Image (spheres, rainbow, N blue to C red):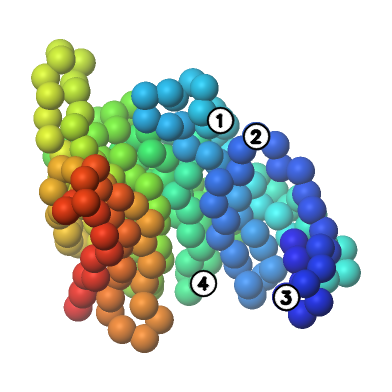
Amino acid sequence: MYSLEYDELISNYYVGDQPALLAVDELNAKLYVSRMMPMSGNDHDMGSETTKIQELSYTSESGLEFSQEFELFLFDAPHAIDFDNVYGNVYTASNTNDYIAKINPSNGSIDYVSLDPNNENQGAGINKLKPLQIVTYAPYIFVSCTGGQWTDNYGNLEDIPGQIQMRDIDDMSLIQTFEFNTFSHPWHIDASLSENKVFVALAGDVQEDSGVSCLEFG
């Protein structure tokens, strides 16, 4: 935790294995910490197997302090994370599982929804879509899914288009899907503060599949 005014270290807090992304609740001075995602093809060597999202509080006087943590039972290594400043929920997903979770920090409840509309009752363990990042923009949430080639338990190879999913911020139901090609791999995303636009970084396998895309929504 640094001071922007004085460019000085204020505080640090040891959170454990491989923190990844952060989400901030500025009104209540809370910080939410996700975990490093296991890297493709090297799941056991890279990234943690934790199932926890940690909540830290922060003040200029006491710095960072542990507040509480939330245990996810449906998937581990939660990576994507964002805080919704309107309704006060935390959203998270793992690159290893096609589910998204909504955490209510005030009561600790966690709701799960499948990101794959064709397999809403698939259960844990399938990662065809490979979600990577979440952005909240009330009344919507946006999820980037890297996609790519996927092999099922029978050895069948399937091309999964990279995509951005637009979902309802309350019940997480799917509203619209923006698809790219199989090898575009939508990565980090950000939403405009003044326009109905989402910007997507494409980490394509080759140059023609990479770059930045702008999506408009109504």
What is the distance, in whole Å, between disc 4 and disc 1 at their CAs? 28 Å
| Relative to 38, 208 lies left or right | left
Disc 2 residue crowd, few under 14, some 14–19, many 20+, Cα 10 Å: few
Which image quadrant: the N terminus?
A: bottom right
Q: Are marks 1 and 2 in contact (CB under 8 Å)?
A: yes
| Relative to 41, 167 lies left or right | left
Residue type, mark 1 in image: Ser
Residue 92 position, x and y percent, is 45, 49
Q: Residue at x 47, y 37 (%)?
A: 37
Q: Is residue 216 above or below residue 200?
A: below
Residue 118 position, x and y percent, is 14, 39
Q: Is residue 100 among the parts visible in the rendering?
A: yes
Which image quadrant: the C terminus?
A: bottom left
What is the distance, in whole Å, between disc 2 and disc 3 at their CAs? 27 Å
Residue 188 versus residue 98: which sits nearer the camera?
A: 188
Q: Is residue 117 among the parts visible in the rendering?
A: no
Give the quarter of the image for residue 168: bottom left
What is the distance, in whole Å, between disc 1 and disc 2 at their CAs? 6 Å
| Mark 1 / mark 3, whichever is N-terminal | 3
Residue type, mark 2 in image: Asp
The residue that disc 2 covers is 17
